[in-house]
Amino acid sequence: HSNYLSRTGQLRKKIDIYAPASPQDLHRQVEYPFVNTHTVEAGFRYQDDIVEIEAIPVSHTVECYAYCIKAFGKKIVYYTDTVFREQDVDFIQNADLFICEATITEGSKHTIGAGHMSDYEAGKLAALSNAKRLCLYHLPGDVDVHRIYEHAKTEFDGELYLSSETRIYMV
């Protein structure tokens, strides 16, 4: 049940959730009595004593944002579903870890490309941004993912990873 923690008394404080206002049906899915829902929009910034987060809108088929997270002298950029956008180089610049989608690749029928970028483009954006490490995610499931790695590596000569739900990435 979605309200298990609040019903059992295990939740002592409301959880803060940040999400775009649209699509509205998705935004409503994170609105619960034990959650403080905050809307992310262009120019969004959050800062406390430990972390600073900035969001910028990106180009996808629905409202979508990329996030820059800075803490303890490190910078992580999570670049969500979007097309290749050279204008975002400054936002990504010198990221210690650049987490970027690579949905499009040769031979995949996963997507026609609307709102997504290729493995080559992800590598190029990492190189243009002088990222230290690149982690590719949102990979198509109908091709050999090692080819995706090789394609991105032709554009980016830094450390490169393919995402894994069991891997821990140290920054």
Image (spheres, rainbow, N blue to C red):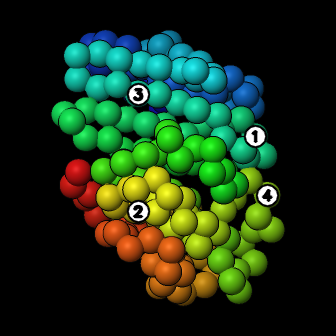
Amino acid carrying label 2: it is Cys
Residue under the image location 47 percent in, 14 percent down: 36
Alpha carbon separation for disc pair 2 and 1 = 23 Å
Q: Quadrant of residue 106?
A: bottom right
User: Could you tell me how far apart the alpha carbons at marks 1 and 4 are, in whole angstroms?
Assistant: 11 Å
Where does label 4 land, which residue?
114
Q: Secondary structure at mark 4?
A: loop
Query: Residue 135 shows which numbered tag?
Result: 2
Along the line of sight, which residue is nearer the eye, 8 or 152?
152
Q: Earlier in the sequence, mark 3 or mark 1?
A: 3
Residue 62 got which mark?
Answer: 1
State the image coordinates of residue 83 (x, y, percent, origin top left).
Answer: 69, 54
Q: Amino acid at mark 3?
A: Ile
Q: Specify the amino acid type for callout 4.
A: Ala
Mark earlier in primary sequence (2, 3) = 3
Measure how far apart labels 3 and 4 are at the Cα level: 27 Å
Compare residues 133 and 11 and report the one nearer the observer.
133
Q: Residue at x 36, y 48 (%)?
A: 95
Among numbered discs 3 and 4, the one appearing first in the sequence? 3
Q: Position of residue 71 (x, y in %)?
A: 25, 32
